Amino acid sequence: MAPIYCILALTILFACSAGCGGDGGSSGPDSGRNFTTMRERMVETQIKGRGVKDQRVLSAMLRVERHRFVPQQYQSQAYADQPLPIGEGQTISQPYIVALMTELLELKGHEKVLEIGTGSGYQAAVLAELSGEVYSIEIIEPLATSAKILLLELGYRNVQVQAGDGYLGWPEQAPFDAIIVTCAPDHIPEPLIEQLKEGGRLVVPVGAHSQELKKIVKRSGKIETTDIIPVLFVPMTGEGATQKK
């Protein structure tokens, strides 16, 4: 439920960095310090260096330990400029794209946020640092279960995770101040527009072979759409794979 690779111009960089990690997860008394240093470098070079300015987002990216959300064999690469496998054919997003999409939501701290595509729970943890309530839906049940357990272990009490079809949203908890989608439908899902509050923001990659990250703002029942950057995410499955417009 995350980008296979997120910005087309960075494909070569991803291929390089994927081969530059160690042979497994870090261990020993210095591992925590090493992860902290890597996280600081990640924020400074990959995120702040590419133009993300929201200080709250930068601080959240510093606090959330990305290495906790990847399998042990990839922990040495957890802060590299690339997505990583998390099992079930899915990936954890490139750190920059997580920060960019989060910044586009314009969170102030009190919002109710819906996430479509929990994955390992990393994006949900970042959202939990920045908003009041997070509701996250994952269509692959084993991922939903493991993410829910991990988020609770890490102390994120303001996140609820459920297994389900994200195309349909979470109508029982609607409306939402902000919605973020970490898989790509080939059109903007109408249920998500309906569940967005007046003035709410939806950030979603849209397209089949050629995808564009879009920011959508709902005003007076209508939507204002801004194209952000070309991206390549795993496709939305479930209802999103069958509904065509």
Image (cartoon, rainbow, N blue to C red):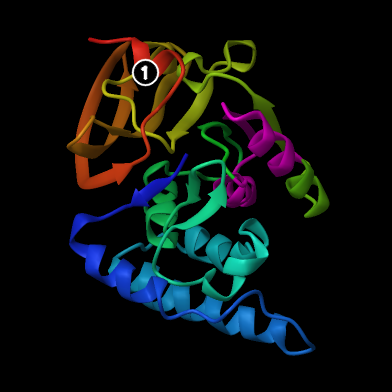
Residue 132: % across, % down: 65, 38
Residue 142: % across, % down: 68, 35
Residue at (67% x, 34% y) in the render: 144
Queried whether the magenta region covers residue 128, the answer comes back as yes
The quarter of the picture where residue 131 lies is: top right
* Front position in the image: 176 or 86: 86
Mark 1, residue position? 241
Q: Amino acid at mark 1?
A: Ala
Residue 181 in the figure: left or right of residue 149: left
Residue 208 in the figure: left or right of residue 128: left
Residue 164: % across, % down: 60, 20
* Front position in the image: 136 or 24: 24
Residue 56: % across, % down: 52, 59
The quarter of the picture where residue 226 lies is: top left
* Front position in the image: 22 or 164: 22
Residue bounds of the magenta highlight: 120-148
